[in-house]
Image (cartoon, grey):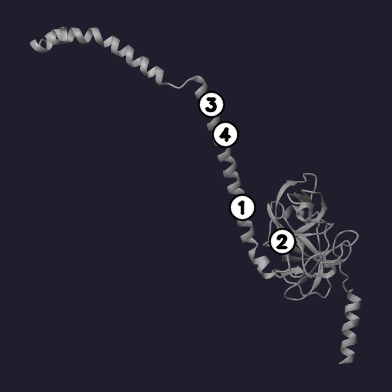
Amino acid sequence: MLLIIGGLTENNLISSIVNGITLPMSEVSAAASKEAAKPSYDELEKENYELKEEMAELRTELADYYNVKQENERLWRYYDLKAENPQYDILPATVVRRDPNDDFYSFTLNKGKMSDVAVGDPVVTENGIIGWVYEVDAYTAKVKTILSPDAKVGVIDTVTRDSGVVSGNVLYADENLTTMTRISALNNLKEGDIVTTTGISGIYPAGLIVGEVKEIAFDKYDTSMYAVISPFEDIRTVIDVVVITSFEGQGEISQNGIEDITLPTQTQTTETAATEEGAQ
């Protein structure tokens, strides 16, 4: 009735009184409707659980994506190696652990027997040879590097054709250097020459890059010459490598699991030269 009278008389006072009386009731009604529209605690808890599950799945998918991306990058990185050597069976692997007690930077890979990795398999990167597998279990493999004195890799200078054996030396390992020993006193090695594997004995494929000659030195203890070799890969920090699980000409592993070659002595070299000269 007040509303009707207020509307007929256009009395603002009456309208204000009516609005003042009904406003609190309207607010209470609106608040009650809003509260009724809110989800319950159980509904909120269920929604929170579902969101957590969805986030976990997304994190897993993201991790898988990055793993696949890195794997693809590794495969592309070694595409040229495989293209140039189709006879190689190569297996990309990752360094998962290093031996803190080893002065020659040995490490463990995340591949093992289940991936066809075997003792003696060469380990390389696109920049050259790293070492070889010396111990393997189902899922991991331990690798010794060419910085170790246990390494004996037959090598040859690609320029002068001088041959020798690459073996690590405790004096150079921390500088990521190794040595080429058992070289002839009549050698023509020069700084900057690149040395590669000979492939003798079938432990390493022929032609794998080992490094470059940094300097020629003289061992005062055994009166012999040797060359300091600088690998093109930093073996101390390498992460992604490739295991060559099979290659053409792969032979039996020697008793100590390393490659060795026999070089002519200086006397033999001189005698051979004299014989050839006499024959001429």
Tell me the quarter of the image containing the N terminus: top left
Q: Nearer the viewer, residue 256 or 186?
A: 256
Which residue is disc 1 drawn over? 70
Q: Nearer the viewer, residue 101 or 34?
A: 34
**Residue displayed at 33% across by 16% down:** 30
How far apart are the two marked residues, 3 and 4, measured between alpha carbons?
A: 11 Å
Q: Is residue 157 above or below residue 89?
A: below
Q: Is residue 81 above or below residue 36?
A: below
How far apart are the two marked residues, 2 and 3, measured between alpha carbons?
A: 49 Å
Front disc: 4 or 2: 4
How far apart are the two marked residues, 2 and 1, measured between alpha carbons?
A: 16 Å
Return the disc, 2 or 1, that comes first in the chain's sequence: 1
Return the disc, 4 or 2, that comes first in the chain's sequence: 4
x, y percent for residue 126: 67, 62
Q: On residue 225, which mark appears?
A: none
How far apart are the two marked residues, 4 and 2, measured between alpha carbons?
A: 38 Å
How far apart are the two marked residues, 3 and 1, measured between alpha carbons?
A: 36 Å
Identified by mark 3, the residue type is: Lys
Which residue is disc 2 drawn over? 90
x, y percent for residue 154: 82, 67
Task: Confirm or deny contact between disc 3 and disc 4 (CB under 8 A).
Answer: no
> In the picture, residue 255 is in which quadrant?
bottom right
Which residue is disc 3 drawn over? 46
Task: Confirm or deny contact between disc 3 and disc 1 (CB under 8 A).
Answer: no
Front disc: 3 or 4: 3
How far apart are the two marked residues, 1 and 4, measured between alpha carbons?
A: 26 Å
x, y percent for residue 280: 86, 92
Q: Residues within 10 Å of mark 4 (few under 14, many from 20)?
A: few
Q: Secondary structure at mark 4?
A: helix
